[in-house]
Amino acid sequence: MCGIVGLYLKNETLRPKIGALFAPMLREMTERGPDSAGIAIYRNPASGSALKVTLAHDDARFDWAGLAADLAQALDVEVAVEHLSTHAVLTLDGEETVIRQWLDRHHPDVRITAVGQVIEIFKEVGLPQQVIDRFGIERMTGSHIIGHTRMATESAVTTAGSHPFSTGSDLCLVHNGSLSNHPRLRDWLKRHAGMRFQTENDTEVAAAYLTWRLAEGDGLREALGHALRDLDGFYTFAIGTRDGFAVLRDPIACKPAVLAETDDWVAMASEYRSLAHLPGVENAKVWEPAPATIYAWGSA
Amino acid sequence: MPAAGGDGSRGVFLEIVDLDVTPLRELNQRLHDLRAGDNLTAWRVVNPKGRHNVAVGVDAPVSITIDGHVGYYCAGMNSQAEIVITGNAGPGLAENMMSGVVRVKGSASQYAGATGRGGLLVIEGDAAGRCGISMKGIDIVVRGSVGHMSAFMGQAGRLLVCGDAGEALGDSLYEARLYVRGTVAGLGADCVERPLGDTERADITELLARAGIEGLEPEDFRCYGSARQLYNFQADKFHAYG
């Protein structure tokens, strides 16, 4: 099973409420995914050339301030750190590859959940409400947000196996379904594209595939078009970009999805009940996305 | 709590059930307990908010209006009842319906009317993929369009689509009869166009009338049925199973 939800605000005045509007959407998907939950939120853009790096560690008492201080010294830059439960968001001027190398060497047990100027990803095992509370999602401000509630079928119930998965700078993916060719595709991406994997999860393979296609020069639409050809299995994807979001279902389209749009927002969910509380939903355009069709908003 | 009110002029009582207040199991149990001749013949369900299994398994000649959107399996296994959903319906609407009428004013998600044995399902908006899959005698009228693989393995009954049909319409069809007014993206294995004869014209006229659709004529539709080549598996026709 699994539940996926996304909310993209067209009306900027709603941004301070995005967490409050979104939390019930995720909570309503508890029955579809009680194992773990995660969100990708686009908020607090880093200024200038600064990067935001979201990190996670299994130990909630991990010394993020210490890590940030060491990283600042090593790179000779200022590092701001915001600590949220088992995660931390570092903001700094630096090259992504340099930061990754430094973390690999000095903190191999720290996972990078997201890198970009706008995106932050938080995910944990537990019920959606626990995850919402843990990271204070209801109080968050932002432009768009994507979430996932997981009922694991293809790999273990772990934080690392939770969604969303980062697919490159300011990009993320959530998935309802199961891919059947993920072992072979993972091997191919390792050998031919030099991709690295943190889990045995099928969705991580889809994320890596999109990362690779985008690195090859595809736009998001082209990358999703290639995904339709190369990914075998069942999927409804919601994809977040720096200033947009997209939805794609496989050609058989067994996995559910519903879209709703008003002048103020676009929302997607596995089921309508996640949208039932949104302001103006009673007059929204509500429809089921067609199979093998890319829907995109913003500059996705 | 449910509010009951009387409509003395018609001898009909309208029962209103608010699903924000009344547990769904309680509603369904009360509907299951209904018997022919009971006074409560008109029900209105408010605040469904996409909940699953609303008004499943009703077996009494009552009318039920569900005011809003419903989730999975609404009106499943319906017998005798006339159920109207004013919003959209999630997957599995009126699955395995036996008799009665189910009408959704909005659109329906996938496999609406699946395996239905009787009764009439009317979808005033669009139906998604697999509408009427394995239909066994149900009549389905869709004012809008249907998605891919509709009427897959349809055995009996009729599907009338006033809009378009998606890929693989009527794949592996048995004896269900299909009528489409708009374009068909593709016919499934063993599904062929059939001439529009008197029987077919009568079907269309009857279905449009029962669904309350005016302004359309039998000649607006094309008829599709089984070529009857794949009833039993034959190894030398393996390629045709696609």
Image (tube, coloured by chain):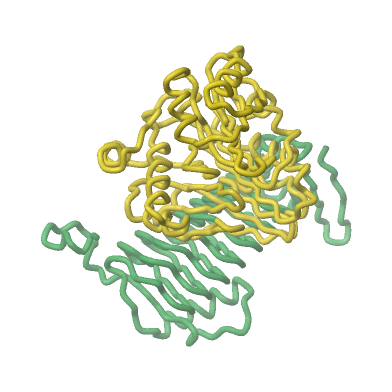
Quadrant, the N terminus of chain B? top right
Camera-nearest residue between B72 and B183: B183
Query: Chain A drawn in what color?
Result: yellow
Camera-nearest residue between A48 and A28: A48
Residue A54 in percent (x, y) is at 57, 31
Camera-nearest residue between B217 and B175: B217
Horizontal side of residue A31 vs B157, given as left or right: right
Colour green belongs to chain: B
Camera-nearest residue between B240 and B1: B240
Asked whether the viewer can see residue B64, the reply is no
Quadrant, the C terminus of chain B? bottom left
Q: Residue at x 16, y 59 (%)?
A: B238
Q: Residue at x 31, y 70 (%)?
A: B191
Residue B176 in percent (x, y) is at 39, 66
Residue A118's place in the image compared with A253, above or below, is above
Q: Residue at x 81, y 41 (%)?
A: B2
